Amino acid sequence: MSLLRLYPLLSFAIVLLAIVAQCISQRNPWLLVLAGGLAALSRTFSEGPRGVTLPRALSLVLTAIALMWSATVAAGDLSQPIPAIGQFVVWLTVIKLYETHSLENEAERLILSLLLMVLASLISIDLLFGFLLLLWVGLGLVTLMLFQLHCAAERMQRQRVRALGLDQVGSPKPVAGPGL
């Protein structure tokens, strides 16, 4: 199996693990069911060539709704703002999972998963969260290296397309060798 084929699966796993860890640290089963379920469904609906993605305007409206919801949650308990920020980041991550899959969005998803784990670390003292944190760190290191490899491969593919003058991404026909 190619390492580049492993990257989308690990990237999704690390984001889903961060959402689950945030929900466990807040001890909020409804957020876990809703956000975790929507995040798991995003792999089915928005991945692949026929994936349906959210338009930018709709994702901005959903982000504004999530911000207002988190502001009302934070207004209820002003002494604990971290759970409200965590809920906003969870919903922002779920929205990002349904957007188009570009290098910038991939980087934003990985950064949001890091932010989720940092926020969860501030409020959780559970042993289960500790195990999830260790698993996330291990997967995160591998995913970060694969992300760098993925970015380099995308950059080289764009340069090759530009140099060959191809309209769509594809491999050139071999001139010599076993693929002829």
Image (tube, helix red, strand yellow):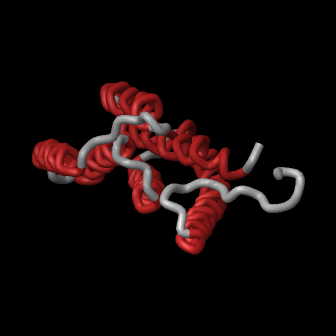
Q: Quadrant of residue 159?
A: bottom right
- Give the position of the N terminus as an image quadrant: top right
Front-most of residues 61 and 37: 61
Q: Is residue 118 in sight in this rendering? A: no
Q: Residue at x 43, y 50 (%)?
A: 101
| Left or right placement of residue 4 versus residue 167 in this view | right
Q: Residue at x 57, y 45 (%)?
A: 8
Q: Is residue 139 above or below residue 129?
A: below
| Left or right placement of residue 7 versus residue 177 in this view | left
User: How far across and how far down the image is residue 161, in percent?
Assistant: 56, 66
Q: Residue at x 53, y 71 (%)?
A: 162
User: How far across and how far down the image is residue 128, in percent?
Assistant: 55, 36
User: How far across and how far down the image is residue 64, in percent?
Assistant: 15, 49
User: How far across and how far down the image is residue 160, in percent?
Assistant: 61, 69
Q: Quadrant of residue 108?
A: bottom left
In the picture as drawn, the residue positioned furthest to the right comes out as: 178
| Left or right placement of residue 92 versus residue 106 in this view | left
Q: Residue at x 63, y 63 (%)?
A: 153
Front-most of residues 71 and 151: 151
Q: Is residue 5 above or below residue 154?
A: above
Q: Is residue 21 above or below residue 79?
A: above
| Left or right placement of residue 164 versus residue 84 in this view | right
Q: How many marks?
A: 0
Q: Is residue 128 in sight in this rendering? A: yes
Front-most of residues 46 and 81: 46
